[in-house]
Amino acid sequence: MRSAAVAAHEPPVDQPVMNEPIRVLIVDDDALVHAALTMLLAGAEDIAVVGEAKDGSEVMDAVAAAGPDIVLMDIRMPTMDGLARTGQPGTAAAAQRTLG
């Protein structure tokens, strides 16, 4: 019989076990924010920062190049902000999830 502590750390039977890290694309025009997010996420063994973009106009090319699972995007940026990019056709399908 397994202990409750061991069972508490196992994923539920209906949820898949993650073998690969979550692939994250960071979109932010502020170099300091981008560096801080990258450093923070690099400390997690189940997350990999796979790409970056400086504004919404660069997102589709960055998604095509990096193939992220999640796009972490600032909502206020020059040229095209995150809200405008999220509303554009094809953005939702570009990555599995977009967080703004």
Image (tube, grey):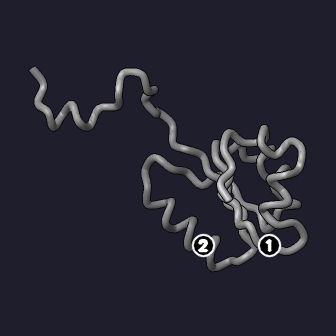
Query: x, y (%) of residue 81?
Result: 82, 66
Amino acid under disc 2: Ala
Give the total number of marks visible in the rendering. Answer: 2
Pointers 2 and 1 in contact (C-beta within 8 Å): no
Q: Which mark is residue 35?
A: 2
Residue sitting at 55 percent across and 73 percent down?
Answer: 36
Query: x, y (%) of residue 41?
Result: 51, 60
- When the figure is inspected, residue 48 is found, relative to residue 3, above or below; the finding is below
Q: Which mark is residue 77?
A: 1
Residue sitting at 72 percent across and 63 percent down?
Answer: 27
Figure quadrant of the C terminus? bottom right
SS of the residue under disc 2: helix
Amino acid under disc 1: Met
In the visual, does 22 lie left or right of 89? left
Q: In the rendered image, which quarter is residue 82 located in? A: bottom right
The mark lying in front, picked from 2 and 1, is 1
SS of the residue under disc 1: loop
Q: Which mark is residue 58?
A: none
Query: x, y (%) of residue 73?
Result: 70, 61
Residue sitting at 64 percent across and 71 percent down?
Answer: 34
In the visual, does 73 lie left or right of 61? left
Residue density around tag 1, few if under 14, some if 14–19, many if 20 or more, within 10 Å: some
Query: x, y (%) of residue 62?
Result: 79, 52
Given residues 50 and 15, the one toward you in this image is 15
Residue density around tag 2, few if under 14, some if 14–19, many if 20 or more, within 10 Å: few
Given residues 55 and 98, the one toward you in this image is 98
Residue sitting at 51 percent across and 42 percent down?
Answer: 21
Q: In the rendered image, which quarter is residue 11 located in? A: top left
